[in-house]
Amino acid sequence: MVYIVSWDEFVDRSVQLFKADPESTRYVFKYRHCDGKLVLKVTDNKECLKFKTDQAQEARKMEKLNNIFFTLMARGPDVDLSEVNGKEQMETQPVKKGRGRKQ
């Protein structure tokens, strides 16, 4: 098992691993509240990539990685990933108003 220190390198190598063998690649994340650590793991039973963090900023980056993997799994490994963004869905949802008085 390889712990990768750089987030960008982890994302790039994970996507390459998935594109090489999409049928047997798995993506798992585990959060331990008592330690405050998040561990992400991508494996294809031959190679295992791991990323560990305790920083809240990097935990938020996980949303973008989830969207990348969801896109790859739904559209196939040949999809263009340049349009995938973690906040894309938030912008398309309508803004809801609060429970204030009706005017």
Image: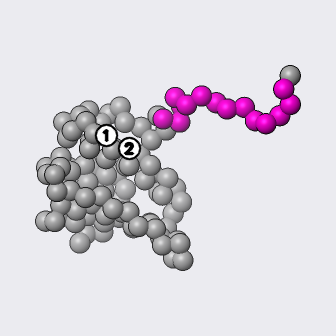
Q: How many marks?
A: 2
Type of secondary structure dominating the magenta stretch: loop
Q: Is residue 34 left or right of residue 3?
A: right
Residue 18 point in image, percent of width and height: 21, 51
Residue type beneath disc 1: Thr
The extreme top residue here reads 103
Residue at left offset 53%, top offset 72%: 33
Task: Read off the magenta span.
Answer: 89-102
For label 2, count other residues whose C-alpha is less than 10 Å away and answer few (under 14), some (14-19) or many (20+). Answer: some
Which residue, given by chain and number where applicable, does mark 1 sit on? 71
- The residue wearing badge 2 is 67
Q: CA distance from mark 1 to mark 2?
A: 6 Å
Look at label 2 and name its amino acid: Asn
Q: Secondary structure at mark 1?
A: helix
Residue 9 appears in view: no
Q: 31 above or below 13?
A: below
Q: Specify the farthest residue to the bottom.
A: 34
